[in-house]
Image (cartoon, helix red, strand yellow):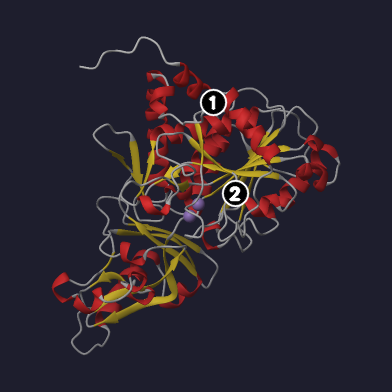
Amino acid sequence: MAEKKEKKTKAEELKDKLFYKQKHSCCTMSEAEVKKADKYCEGYKSFLNNCKTEREAAAEAVRMAVEKGFELFDINKSYKAGDKVYRLNRKKAVILAVIGKQPIENGVNLTAAHIDSPRLDLKQNPLYEAEELGYFKTHYYGGIKKYQWPTVPMALHGIIVRADGTEITVCVGEDEKDPCFVVTDLLPHLADEQYKRPAARLITGEELNILIGSRPFRDDECSEAVKLNLMNILFEKYNIVEKDFLSAELECVPAFKARDIGFDRSMVGSYGQDDRVCAYTAFTSLLDMKGVPERTAVCVLTDKEETGSDGNTGLRSAYLRYFLEDLAQTLGGVDGRTVMSASRCLSADVNAGFDPTFPDVLEKRNCSYLNKGIVVTKFTGARGKSGTSDANAEYVGYVHSLLDKNGIVWQTGELGKVDLGGGGTVAAYIANLDIDTIDVGVPVLSMHAPFEITAKNDVYMAYRAFSAFYKAE
Ligand code: MN
Ligand code: MN
């Protein structure tokens, strides 16, 4: 047994003082706080299970907000400090705000996370039959490794808008008693030719067909009897005809539930954690806020991040700017630009956690690790930081000191080694509004896979970081 060291050497002392070394969260969090993290993640897991699409996440955020006293924002009403408002954008994006004590021209403290996740969307004319099996054609949404998605039990979520304008909400495959669906793959015995394909085309986009049935309609004369039988079931259940798919938005997502990972239950495994982990932490910390914030606190949960933020529910559109302009007008009769220029933002999105099985893609001194707290990412982008907003050092310093002051475990992060790839978030689009913006978030393993991994301590640290940020002067 090694002798216990009594005293640190001068060099050790100096190293402790001068070197930056991020410790495991369990070394800095008390046991009671780790328990709190575990407890908080029970609510998080329910949210993941109940909200697998942007529409479901938006509806749930509004439901929970209304329960906490948030009201639909009305530009003609007058508001006072402490009032809580929300705006729903086309049922797919939400902005929540708590009015602060300071005049609105002092700016807002804004968080932004996205509630869309990679998945398989049905094409507009999806239903077909091939060799007496029934299928849906899909077009994948967001960046996926396509080979990961076959042989995963899938559920179908979304809405169908009928020709008469009426809407039907669809959710099949989540209840244990529901049927679910699946993309098939080739057996290894016959995969010699498939193995020769490059991995990106091991399964192609047009092979991501979802198996939905196999029994024919009972009529010997009829062709496409399996398709007919399926359409007949859909007609009886939803009162839809095939043409109604043309105006539907149906999304196939993994049917499994969020689970604890590891003997120590330290992690959460689930579909859709990018970026519902930041969405959940960003809006629940606003809902749980005690007292009235100094500056107006705003949380936007956006859609379309995974496809590049275009469209009127994505953050490249003007909907956030319009809301801030409306706030500026209603609260202070000032220009929106005055408010935006004085505002600060935490762009809340996940980062790639270091995976020891694949150590070569991340640079160890600058990447993020599971259990080392919320990640602060100064810049994203690819090939010479292209596409990043790259936060100013002054603003990074502000966030650095805010997190330290509040005892929040945090680390720095980078999305991969230089020139190995990269990616972006909504940060650039918010920074382009002249708002000080930086990326923060939770490290994830297996990002964009059907089952993604986060550490509970990091999830909780994100929640605490957003709470501190909303309250900041
Ligand atoms: Mn993301
Ligand atoms: Mn993503």
Q: Residue furthest top?
A: 6
Label 2 to label 1, Cα distance in Å?
25 Å
Counting from the top left corner in percent of width and height, residue 301 is at 57, 47
Is residue 264 visible in the rendered image? The answer is: yes
Tell whether 280 sits left or right of 6: right
Q: Nearer the viewer, residue 243 or 219?
A: 243
Q: In the rendered view of the protein, which quadrant contains the N terminus?
A: top left
Q: Quadrant of the C terminus?
A: top right
Secondary structure found at label 1: helix
Tag on residue 18?
1
Left or right position of 368 against 336 = left
Picture coordinates of residue 126, whole percent (x, y):
39, 75
| Residue corresponding to mark 2 | 379
Left or right of 278 in this view: 99: right
Determine crowd level at label 2: few under 14, some 14-19, many 20+ residues with C-alpha closer than 10 A. many
Instruction: Give the amino acid type for the residue marked by disc 1 in the picture.
Output: Leu
Residue 109 visible to an observer of this rendering: no
Residue neighbourhood size for the residue with mark 1, other residues' Cα within 10 Å, grouped as few (<14), some (14–19), many (≥20) = few
Q: Is residue 272 above or below residue 295?
A: below
x, y (%) of residue 183?
29, 67
Q: Are marks 2 and 1 in contact (CB under 8 Å)?
A: no
| Front-most of residues 415 and 67 | 415
